[in-house]
Image (spheres, rainbow, N blue to C red):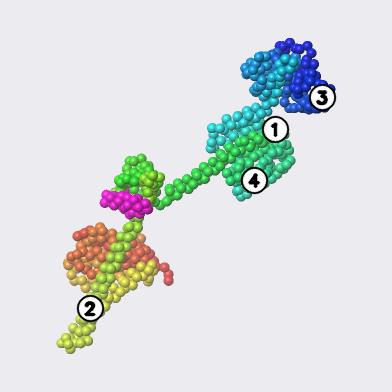
Amino acid sequence: MIWQPSMAKPSDPNLEREELRRRLIGLGEDSVHKSYYPQLQRHHAELERFKALLENTFDLIILLSVPSATIIDANATACRALGTSLEMLQQLSFFDLLVGGEEALPGALRRLISSCESEESRGSDVVQLLAADGGRLAVELALSRIAFREQAYVAVVARDVSERLRQEGMLLKVAQGVAAETGDRFFPLLAAALADALEADCAFVGEIVAEPQQSIRTISVWIDGEFEKNFTYDLKGTPGESVVQHGIGAFAEAIQQQFPQDERLKRWRAEAYVGIPLLAADGRSSGIIAVLFRQPLKRLTHTTAMLRIFATRAAAELDRRRQQLLLKRSEERFRTLVANIPAAVYRVRFTPGFEAIFFNDSIASMTGVSAQELMSGICTLGDLVHCDDRDRLFNEISLAVTQRRTFSVEFRLIDQDGVVRWVQNRGQAIFSPEGAVRYLDGTLFDITPHKLAEEALLRFDQQKTHFISTAAHELRTPLASVLGYTEALLDAGEYGGFDRAQQLDFLRDIYSRGETLSRLIDDLFDISRIQQGDDLSLEMEEGDLALLAERLVRQFALLGKKHRFVFQNRSEGRFCCFDRTRLTQVLENLLTNAVKYSPQGGEIVVSLSDEAHELRLQVSDHGVGMTREQLARVFDRFYRADMSDTAVGGLGLGMSIVKQIIDAHGGRIEVESTLGEGTHVSIWLPCRSCPPR
């Protein structure tokens, strides 16, 4: 026996006990009288009910004498809970049962038991009682003072709260484990804490997904004291299906027999399972929290209650996690969009300098200045704006801000290399609740190619207008000669008549002017086909390019007495495949240009030479030459590099057509020119045989 009796016992405890039991219901022999027999029967009935209550209650009931605290009586529940008999208890003081002795009770309760003059009549507290086997029993005490025959007694009612305290300790343990955690760490800590507190072999938390059908994707799995890799499994035929469908899945034993299709239960050797759904804000099941045991579960109700308590917190955390994932994905999509959008996306302050708050990386390719440099204040957007556009840009944006509308402004930026770029700025002001401008949000689109295209289109339109005027002049001049000579020949009498020689001169001039008109019309047809995307038709044949070049040089020498023509043949008589008519057109055009832009007496040299697998044909003059700007546009349609002191004619189509003819032959053409020194046009044609027709 572990108790040490410390108090003297009454001489006849059995008699005193019976009298006190009757006293508890207000029954004593002094109050009995034969005339009150019906009342006596009722008292007996009440006594029987009291006895039944005393013996069958789950509470421990102990009767103490005052001030000795000697145990006079105890019900059967007390004897069972303390592991001893009533006779043994009657040898003890109540203080002998207390872990810690008399000091374990608060002062008020000690006085209620030990002092006859105590003013307290009731009191309660939670203490630990010492059982016969050394075990400890946590009880909640309720003490009441009873007076009988001028003797004070105390009735002790003790309720076993060991299980409740254990549950509270487990709740506290789990709560302390996860209280300060959120995010990704919360669910692993929860799973580990639940498994530890409930003495489960496995605990897991999962979210419900529908890929391709309703499944569980675990967030954290704790098994046998360590975390397991997350997995996804189909709910069909598993305890999780019951959890989702019925709002609970509580199986105290034989879980594998009830769900034979669940292979994971077999692998985990599970015997019991308790699962609770995690409910989203709209009431739908968003996940599951569950624990598994390898032995039959005795505390099913307690385990279920514990899971329900933490399911609410877990559901809230799961919802927060999903919202964070959605936000993260949205931010990633936004970042991807902003990073790949072909424009500079910005947020800047509404000041003349437009100090940067945010820029995407596209600003670097536009200006040569990185987004980080702008956001760190090394330079501002205003620093990059062309000085002639700064005031206009700020004024137009200010007007849009005042009118609370979006703005769209085109202006020029100067990049780090000094290159001017045109950009279109589209955006709007963001206002605070008080109406103040917080910042400007917008985009900068590089419209430099568009601006260049506009300028090119404008130049082309101007060239076309000039071409029409020039074409009319070029066609009218020879046509006027043809009409004049024809009129003279038809009405010879009015002009005094013409002899045979004069008539032949007139006819030759008419023929020459007709040829000029024919060439002009051929050029117009060629350029029309080129503009429509049609290829120039070629009649390819093998021939000696030297013979063709030499013949044309002789012709121009006979007709152009004011210039000196030289032909230099450095080739080895190699044949190549070419269209004789088209190459004649090319050489005539180049020789005509050389004559037009060379002074009288100037030398024009045509040379032919071998270069690897090509023939090089070059036409050189010592004329007026061209500027760099003119040279850059020499192959443009409708463009003429006329100098003001030459006033030469032409449609400006020749060099464009020449390039198209050479390209069609698979060759190449280059022009070198220096203003005031002359021009050199070089053509390379491949030396190859013509394919069989």
Inspect this view and state whether residue 221 appears: no
Residue 36, numbered circle: 3
- Near-viewer residue (328 or 176): 176
Residue 480, numbered circle: 2
Do labels 2 and 1 touch, CB within 8 Å?
A: no
Of discs 3 and 2, which sits in the foreground? Answer: 3
Of discs 1 and 3, which sits in the foreground? Answer: 3
**Label 3 SS:** helix
Which badge, 2 or 4, comes first in the chain's sequence? Answer: 4
How far apart in space, not on screen, are marks 3 and 2 (Cα)? 160 Å
Q: Position of residue 312 (x, y in %)?
A: 60, 38
Q: Name the residue rendered at 71%, 20% in the picture.
A: 155
Q: Name the residue rendered at 66%, 21% in the picture.
A: 122
The residue singled out by tag 1 in the image is 299
How far apart in space, not on screen, are marks 3 and 4 (Cα)? 77 Å
- Residue 653: quarter of image: bottom left
Of discs 2 and 1, which sits in the foreground? Answer: 1
**Label 2 SS:** helix
The magenta segment: 386-415
Residue at the left extreme, as displayed? 496
Q: Position of residue 35 (x, y in %)?
A: 83, 24
Residue 234, numbered circle: 4
**Label 1 SS:** loop
Inspect this view and state whether residue 630 appears: yes
Do labels 1 and 4 touch, CB within 8 Å?
A: no
Residue 139, numbered circle: none
Which badge, 1 or 3, comes first in the chain's sequence? Answer: 3
Do labels 1 and 3 touch, CB within 8 Å?
A: no
- Near-viewer residue (430 or 152): 152
Do labels 3 and 2 touch, CB within 8 Å?
A: no
Of discs 1 and 4, which sits in the foreground? Answer: 1
